[in-house]
């Protein structure tokens, strides 16, 4: 019920739903007599995270990702290490009793941005494509670096020993191993689907069921082998997405889009609402008497996490170009607004809080993990500050700086649609010499007319502003086709109500009408 009500409220307010869910969850947590809902770190890491990572990998543009691998790498690895070290030094200095291993654990917890939050908040903003690629690409990869440092810090806190020379080799092993597991599982799923399709043993629903298990099939073996489950799930998603044209039928894709859109939205709602509900438990654990100093520490660390991103992003953007003429020529200096927006997009989320809650309770000898409850509270402060404050203001900042999508992608999409239709027309013309009956010529003529009409229709979108008559005809065309489709729907609905047609036939015809309506709106 909360999910439905808050989703409507989010649309009504025009605010990204993760922010609404976190704030509302925090308030709901203090409702008297409401049962306390504890977040189980294993539940998030095992069930929720693989789905999000695989889905984000599936929608990642691999070509754009490769083109921007340098800035993504600087953020996903360089910024994570930088933030971890500075936050650790700050926490060790200002929080009494915060040992170095615990301080590094806190730094690693708050260092990575959250892929779920980044995707959800950026979805409603007209970002330039390159900025969106860098922001989402960073959030997909940086968990691997942060969680590796986190594991070393926990091991040092628990055992009291730390071997610095093993950190870099271990990180390389974890990263490469995760990518390899993702590729192996992705290839195995591809082979399975190809074999099943060749023997006609799989349909549209079963295909999507298999793909739903692919995130776990990559994530779990990676964890068992001690490598990055994050990178394994992301890699499997990217790989299978590139193979999808050969693996999925049109019906499989239509069903799959609906399944994944519903699943990811519900999981997002669950995660962010659950995130807000944890505030009551966090406050209860640390005790009300300690809230004053904790808030001070939380504000200090939150400001540091925000400022450190600016301190890193601007030099990382301009210094390499100053030092490399080749880089300047290949990739000129971006306007200052670009690194500013990237700096302002450092939202933290559920992964940070889950890592904080997963901190061990005791260390070697049975002593309590140093400042465990304080670390959880500070982590929540950083999440709230970055997710709510920065996420809520991000659309305003983007508009104020004038950093908006310039419409080139929309124009490019129309041009590609026209090229595809022209290829279809060319193929029909190539088949004409093989026609030996009037029926073939008549059918081909109808199809050619439809293709030509769609080309003219899309061309009108390209120069609609310069050609008011074409835009007007386009509007009339849309209206008339929509009226005709609505009339068809009314007719089959009436026949269904009167019992003239069974539901199976009704749903088949309705599905075709929905496809026609989707094509009309896409055009």
Image (spheres, grey):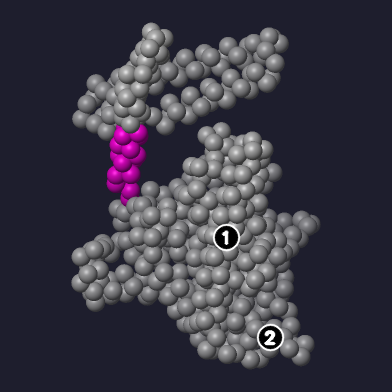
For the residues marked 1 and 2, what is the alpha-carbon distance in whole angstroms?
34 Å
Does the magenta segment cover residue 337? no
Q: Nearer the viewer, residue 267 or 172?
A: 172
Q: Residue at x 38, y 8 (%)?
A: 438
Q: Which residues are magenta?
A: 404-420
**Where does residue 64 sit, x and y in percent of width and height?**
38, 55
**Where does residue 137 sit, x and y in percent of width and height?**
45, 60
What label does residue 158 carry, if any? Answer: 2
State the quadrant of the N terminus: top right
Q: Nearer the viewer, residue 76 or 424?
A: 424
Above or below, comparing residue 44 to residue 322 in the picture: above
Residue 167 visible in the snapshot: yes
**Where does residue 401 sit, x and y in percent of width and height?**
31, 56
Residue located beneath label 1 in the image: 184
Q: Is residue 69 left or right of residue 158?
A: left
Q: Is residue 433 left or right of residue 80?
A: left
Q: Main secondary structure of the magenta part?
A: helix
Above or below, comparing residue 409 to residue 489 in the picture: below
Q: Nearer the viewer, residue 513 or 403?
A: 513
**Where does residue 291 sit, x and y in percent of width and height?**
64, 75
Q: Is residue 324 left or right of residue 453?
A: left
Q: Residue at x 33, y 48 (%)?
A: 405
Location of residue 226 (image quadrant): bottom right
């Amino acid at each position: 019920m909360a999910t439905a009500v808050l989703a409507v409220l989010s649309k009504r307010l025009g605010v990204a739903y993760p922010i609404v869910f976190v704030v509302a969850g925090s308030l709901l947590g203090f409702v008297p007599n409401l049962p306390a809902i504890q977040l189980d770190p294993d539940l998030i890491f095992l069930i929720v995270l693989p789905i999000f990572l695989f889905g984000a990998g599936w929608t990642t543009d691999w070509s754009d990702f490769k083109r921007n691998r340098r800035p993504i790498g600087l953020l996903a690895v360089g910024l994570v290490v930088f933030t971890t070290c500075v936050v650790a030094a700050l926490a060790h200095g200002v929080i009494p009793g915060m040992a170095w291993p615990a301080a590094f654990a806190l730094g690693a917890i708050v260092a990575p941005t959250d892929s779920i939050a980044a995707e959800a908040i950026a979805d409603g903003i007209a970002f330039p494509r390159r900025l969106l690629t860098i922001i989402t690409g960073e959030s997909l990869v940086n968990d691997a670096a942060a969680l590796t440092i986190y594991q070393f810090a926990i091991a040092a806190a628990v055992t009291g020993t730390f071997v610095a020379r093993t950190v870099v080799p271990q990180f390389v092993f974890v990263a490469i191993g995760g990518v390899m597991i993702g590729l192996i599982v992705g290839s195995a799923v591809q082979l399975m689907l190809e074999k099943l399709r060749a023997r006609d043993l799989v349909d549209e629903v079963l295909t999507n069921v298999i793909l739903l298990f692919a995130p776990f099939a990559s994530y779990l073996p990676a964890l068992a082998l001690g490598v990055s489950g994050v990178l394994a799930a992301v890699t499997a998603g990217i790989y299978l997405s590139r193979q999808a044209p050969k693996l999925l039928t049109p019906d499989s894709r239509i069903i799959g889009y609906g399944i994944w859109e519903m699943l990811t939205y519900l999981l997002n709602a669950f995660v962010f609402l659950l995130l807000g509900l944890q505030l009551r438990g966090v406050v209860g654990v640390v005790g009300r008497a300690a809230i004053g100093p904790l808030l001070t520490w939380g504000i200090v660390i939150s400001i540091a996490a925000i400022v450190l991103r600016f301190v890193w992003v601007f030099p990382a953007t301009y210094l390499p170009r100053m030092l490399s003429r080749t880089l300047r020529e290949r990739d000129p200096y971006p306007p200052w607004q670009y690194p500013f927006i990237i700096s302002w997009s450092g939202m933290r989320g559920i992964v940070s809080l889950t890592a904080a809650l997963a901190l061990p309770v005791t260390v070697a000898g049975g002593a309590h993990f140093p400042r465990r409850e304080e670390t959880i509270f500070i982590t929540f402060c950083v999440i709230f500050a970055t997710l709510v404050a920065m996420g809520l203001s991000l659309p305003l900042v983007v508009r104020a700086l004038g950093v908006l999508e310039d419409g080139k992608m929309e124009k490019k999409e129309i041009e590609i649609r026209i090229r595809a239709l022209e290829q279809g027309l060319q193929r029909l013309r190539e088949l004409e010499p093989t026609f030996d009956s009037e029926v073939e010529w008549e059918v081909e003529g109808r199809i050619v007319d439809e293709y030509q009409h769609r080309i003219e229709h899309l061309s009108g979108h390209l120069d609609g502003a310069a050609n008011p008559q074409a835009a007007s005809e386009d509007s009339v065309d849309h209206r008339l086709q929509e009226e005709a489709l609505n009339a068809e729907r009314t007719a089959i609905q009436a026949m269904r109500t009167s019992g003239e047609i069974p539901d199976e036939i009704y749903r088949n015809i309705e599905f075709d009408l929905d496809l026609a309506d989707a094509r009309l709106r896409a055009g």
